[in-house]
Structures are given as C-alpha cells and as structure tokens.
C-alpha cells in the first residue's frame, strides 16, 4: 500500500519537472497522510492543457452517499483498478500524477513494525500514478478526491512490504494523463513496478507513525540495529 509520503522539493523545481512555465506555491511536507490535500497534475478543462490541482487523498466515487467511504479508498490496486466499481470510471476518464520525493512503508519485525523511507538515490522528485473523482457534497459544492495506485513490490520493497505505490517513468507521464487514451494494452504496460536500480530504502524513526509529525527529522536515518 501507500499510506504516507513526502513532498519537500522546492515548488520552482516541481514546476520545472511537471509543468514548465507554471507558477506553483507549495509548502514542504514530510509526512503526508490520507485525508489531507495533496498536489496532483491532471488534464485541465482546456484542450491539450495540464494543470496543478489540490485533491483530498481518499477517493469518493461520484455515486457515494457519504464522503467517509474515501477513508477506505486511499489506494487502488493496479491489478483491479479497471474493474472495481469505485475506481473504474476514474481510471478510464480521470487519471493524474501525484508528485513525491519519497514514501514510507512499514516492515513487520517481531511484535511491531519498523518504518522505512524509500526514495530515488539522486533525490529527484517522481510521480505516483493516481486517479481522481468529483463528488457533490451539497448542491453547488463539489469535492475533488484521489487515490494512488499500488502494485507488487520491486526488489527494494519486497523485503519490506508486499505492495508499493505505482511509480511512473517520466516518459510515460503524457500517456497516463491523456484522457483520450482508454484502458488498453497501452496503459496495461504501465501497471507494473518500476525497476529498483535507482532507488534506496533505509529505516527511520517511529515518529512518522503519528500523522501530525512533520519536519526533516521524519526522514532522518535511524539506527538499523
């Protein structure tokens, strides 16, 4: 699964990577949790344009009666996202990128779990594959929410957890975001774990278990012993 991640790359650098020429304001975050607003890149209403958007993490399907369902729909499995009623329409019509520069997973050790931080070795930002949805909370009041896709783990993640977020190669961002591309073999080839060669993982302190814990100390390496 993907339950926490970071995004502290400077806003100017994020704009350069994901939407050159756009102006972005973003607060550095070291412990982003479900239910919070997260930065996304998606197709805009204007033809052939992309935009930054803030979406609440936890997808609420358009047909939902209660927004609380989003608490359970933080992640969508890549293997079934095209079939599940809660996700299939968003996967078909409303895909997005979720920028990040690292994420956390928890490894079971004895009676407890040890948090690990996973990132690219060069510290570069990357993007999770996401889907998003609009939900009418009240007449005239629409809430936009999202979920992050997960897949089986690569070689870095497999000793830690049995799932990992689906990370897209930069050369496939355009394909993922193009709403004219239907679910097909072209998208199916993206629904697999990214190679682990450029990634690293290390244990961090258990303070990240508390959602409101913030700051660079969250990603500080902990004693692995």
Image (cartoon, rainbow, N blue to C red):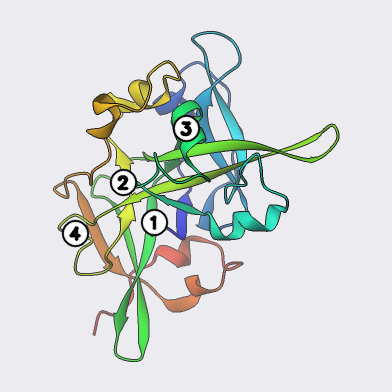
Question: Could you say which disc has been placed on residue 96 in the image?
Answer: 3
Residue 21 visible to the viewer: yes
Q: Dot 1: what SS?
A: strand
Question: Could you say which disc has been placed on residue 156 in the image?
Answer: 4
Question: Could you say which disc has been placed on residue 123 in the image?
Answer: 2
Q: Nearer the viewer, mark 4 or mark 3?
A: 3
Q: Dot 4: what SS?
A: loop
Residue plotted at (61% across, 15% down): 45
Q: Earlier in the sequence, mark 1 or mark 4?
A: 1
Disc 1: which residue: 103
**Image location (x, y in percent) of residue 19:** 47, 22
Mark 4 surroundings within 10 Å by alpha-carbon count, few (fewer than 14), some (14 through 19), many (20 or more): some
Q: Is residue 35 above or below residue 162?
A: above
- Front-most of residues 14 and 151: 151
Q: Earlier in the sequence, mark 4 or mark 3?
A: 3
- Front-most of residues 142 and 117: 142
Mark 2 surroundings within 10 Å by alpha-carbon count, few (fewer than 14), some (14 through 19), many (20 or more): few
Residue 33 visible to the viewer: no
Q: Is residue 105 above or below residue 102?
A: below
Q: Nearer the viewer, mark 4 or mark 2?
A: 4
Residue plotted at (23% across, 49% down): 121
**Image location (x, y in percent) of residue 29:** 54, 52
The alpha-carbon separation of the residues under discs 1 and 4 comes to 13 Å
Q: Nearer the viewer, mark 1 or mark 2?
A: 1
């Amino acid at each position: 699964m993907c339950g926490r991640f970071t995004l502290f790359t400077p806003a100017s650098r994020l704009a350069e990577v994901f939407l050159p020429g756009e102006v972005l304001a973003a607060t550095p975050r070291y412990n982003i949790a479900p239910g919070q607003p997260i930065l996304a890149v998606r197709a805009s209403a204007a033809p052939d344009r992309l935009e930054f958007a803030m979406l609440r993490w936890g997808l609420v399907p358009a047909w939902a009666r209660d927004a609380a369902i989003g608490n359970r729909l933080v992640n969508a499995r890549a293997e079934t996202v095209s079939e599940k009623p809660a996700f299939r329409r968003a996967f078909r019509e409303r895909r997005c990128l979720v920028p990040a520069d690292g994420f956390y997973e928890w490894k079971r050790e004895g009676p407890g779990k040890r948090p690990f931080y996973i990132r690219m070795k060069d510290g570069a930002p990357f993007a999770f594959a996401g889907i998003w949805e609009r939900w009418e909370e009240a007449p005239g009041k629409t809430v936009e929410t999202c979920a992050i896709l997960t897949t089986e783990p690569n070689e870095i993640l497999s000793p830690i957890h049995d799932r990992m977020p689906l990370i897209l190669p930069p050369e496939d961002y355009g394909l993922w975001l193009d709403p004219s591309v239907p679910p097909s073999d072209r998208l199916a080839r993206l629904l697999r774990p990214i190679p682990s060669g450029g990634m690293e993982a290390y244990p961090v302190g258990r303070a990240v278990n508390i959602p409101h814990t913030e700051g660079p100390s969250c990603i500080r390496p902990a004693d692995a012993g």
